[in-house]
Amino acid sequence: MLNYKSDHIRARQEVLGTTIIGGTIPNPADTPKSFRLLVREIQSLALELNHFLVSEKNFKIYRPNL
């Protein structure tokens, strides 16, 4: 099972620090390495997997480069 915080060391540290001081948890800024590895493995099987971010304000789709 892939979890956003499981392999993303910088984000995990930010969440821990924010939890300790009682702030709000930041939104993810980039894709975890485990997800990028999964995408490369799937692409090596000649399959395509896309990652989309949808804006909550105007529902625009952003396609970040992996």
Image (spheres, grey):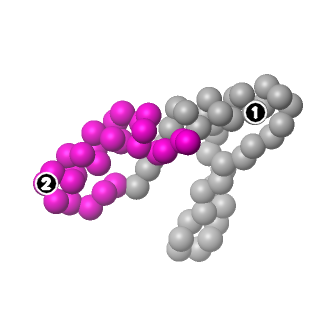
Task: Name which residue type carries label 2.
Answer: Ile
Which residue is painted at 34% across and 55% down in the image? 26
Residue indicated by mark 1: 42
User: Residue 25: which quarter of the image?
Assistant: bottom left
Q: Is residue 48 magenta?
A: no
Residue projecting furthest to the right = 46
Give coordinates of residue 57: x percent, y percent.
53, 74
Which x, y percent locates residue 61?
66, 61
Image point 29% across, 48% down: which residue? 15
Chief secondary structure of the magenta portion: helix
What range is drawn magenta here? 1-26
Give the CA distance from mark 2 to mark 1: 40 Å
Q: Tell me the residue that label 2 is attached to.
A: 21
Name the residue type under label 1: Ile
Lateral position of residue 31 relative to residue 43, left or right: left
4 drawn magenta: yes
- Which quadrant of the figure contains the N terminus? top right
Residue 8 position (above or below residue 25): above
- Of residues 30 and 39, the one nearer the viewer is 39
Q: Are there few (<14), some (14-19), or many (20+) residues within 10 Å of tag 1?
A: few
Of callouts 2 and 1, the N-terminal one: 2
- Above or below: residue 46 compared with residue 2: above
Compared with residue 43, is residue 19 higher up or lower down, i.e. above or below? below
